[in-house]
Image: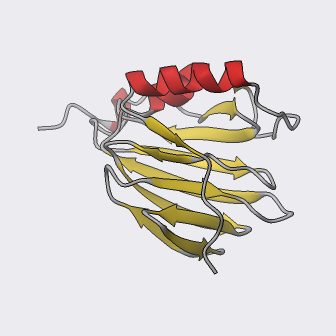
């Protein structure tokens, strides 16, 4: 039986975080969904990549604007506006915006709980703006990887070249 009621949801606006050059807005989390899922509304800058990784949660990516590459277990899919891609929990995958325009993507992870990772590695901001582009340092990446381990993420390196 759920403990959630609309009256118990005290958050009225999303939380916004800058994470390695992208903007991730947490619009629903484990606390507000009785642990069932996490929803991220992401603004992904051109040439952004999150690299190959795994985590226990299943994940759905739904593109609102722009175009994105979803790489799942050696297979590439190009997602455009109105299309979705699915990643089963535990599968090796990665996501990239290989285009010249900002891509807006809704990501849903189930079960919830990964929001702690994004809160820990991101810099909270009060709006949905993209941060200034950055080139992650080795120190930044090592910190992100170590934080990811605490939340069940394993990072495996960059995405492979796209198979043509």
Say above or below: 159 vs 14. Answer: below
Q: Nearer the viewer, residue 106 or 161?
A: 161
| Total marks placed | 0
Residue under the image location 84 percent in, 62 percent down? 101
The percent position of residue 79, horizontal first and vertical second, equals: 60, 73
The percent position of residue 66, horizontal first and vertical second, equals: 74, 68
Q: Nearer the viewer, residue 158 or 66?
A: 158
Say above or below: 97 vs 43. Answer: below
Say if residue 11 shows up in the picture: no
In the image as oriented, which residue stretches furthest toward the left? 1
Looking at the rendered image, the quarter that the N terminus falls into is: top left
Looking at the rendered image, the quarter that the C terminus falls into is: bottom right
Is residue 121 toward the left or the right of residue 108 in the image? Answer: right
Say if residue 12 shows up in the picture: yes
Residue under the image location 54 percent in, 54 percent down? 94
Say above or below: 134 vs 48. Answer: above
Residue 96 falls in image quadrant: bottom right
The percent position of residue 15, horizontal first and vertical second, equals: 60, 31
Residue under the image location 39 percent in, 27 percent down? 151
């Amino acid at each position: 039986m759920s403990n959630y009621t609309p009256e118990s949801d005290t958050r009225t606006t999303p939380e916004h975080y800058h994470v390695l050059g992208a903007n991730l807005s947490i619009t629903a989390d484990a606390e507000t969904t009785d642990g069932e899922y996490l929803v991220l509304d992401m603004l992904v800058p051109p040439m952004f990549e999150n690299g190959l990784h795994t985590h226990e949660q299943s994940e759905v990516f739904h593109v609102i604007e722009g175009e994105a590459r979803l790489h799942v277990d050696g297979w590439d899919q190009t997602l455009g506006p109105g299309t979705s891609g699915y990643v089963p929990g535990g599968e090796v995958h990665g996501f990239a915006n290989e285009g010249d325009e900002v891509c807006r993507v809704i990501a849903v992870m189930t079960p919830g709980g990964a929001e702690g990772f994004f809160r820990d590695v991101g810099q909270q901001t009060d709006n949905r703006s993209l941060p200034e582009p950055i080139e992650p340092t080795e120190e930044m990446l090592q910190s992100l990887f170590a934080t990811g381990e605490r939340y069940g993420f394993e990072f495996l390196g960059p995405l492979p070249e796209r198979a043509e």
